[in-house]
Amino acid sequence: MGKNANALENLTFVITGATDERPRDEFGNYIQALVESHGGQMRGSISGRTDYLVCGTYHFNPFLGTVGTIENGSKYRKALEKGTRIIDGDMLVDIINGSGEV
């Protein structure tokens, strides 16, 4: 994955969710490290300037302690409203490796 060090340059990302393999914080740290080590920028919320929302497989609300489908998350819904591209971690790796669509 290191061969395309600037593969994500000038792109902005937001993270949401978790996976069975990686809980929320671990998933977020993993995606953030991938994005930043390949020239991308991280943001905490969706805006008109967000290029990608990187999603886990489920949504966890830390305030309520509830778990649900990723489609129920507020970041996911806002990304849909704004027309932000929604991808998962594997698709992010594909973009970094040059085999995914930017």
Image (spheres, helix red, strand yellow):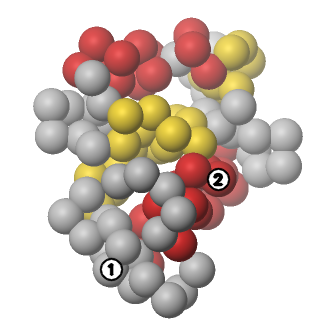
Counting from the top left corner in percent of width and height, residue 67 is at 73, 18
> What percent of the width, then of the height, locates residue 102?
35, 54
Side of 34 where 23 appears, left or right? right
**Spot occupied by residue 34 in the image (x, y as percentages of width and height):** 51, 69
Say few, some or many: other residues with alpha carbon within 10 Å of mark 2 (under 14 / 14 to 19 / 20 or more): few
Please tell me which residue lies in front, 46 or 60.
46
Task: Say which label, 2 or 1, has the lower sequence index.
Answer: 1
> Left or right: where does residue 56 sit relative to residue 14?
right
In this picture, is 16 found above or below 80? below
Kind of residue sitting beneath label 2? Asp
Q: In this view, does 5 lie above or below 36?
A: below
Q: Tell me if residue 57 comes above or below residue 8 in the rendering.
A: above
Q: Which of 34 and 3 is in front in this view?
A: 3
**Which residue matches tag 1?**
6
In three-dimensional space, the C-alpha distance between marks 2 and 1, rounded to whole angstroms, equals 18 Å
Residue visible at 45% across and 33% down in the picture: 86
**Circle 1 sits in a helix, a strand or a loop, which is it?**
loop
Q: Look at mark 2 in the image and give the residue it sits on.
A: 90
Left or right of 31 in this view: 86: left
The location of residue 39, given as percent across then percent down, is 31, 74
Q: In which quarter of the image is residue 83?
A: top left
What residue sits 27% from the left and 52% below the top? 12
Q: Is residue 23 above or below residue 78?
A: below
| Residue situated furthest left in the rendering | 48
Asked whether the viewer can see residue 49, the reply is yes
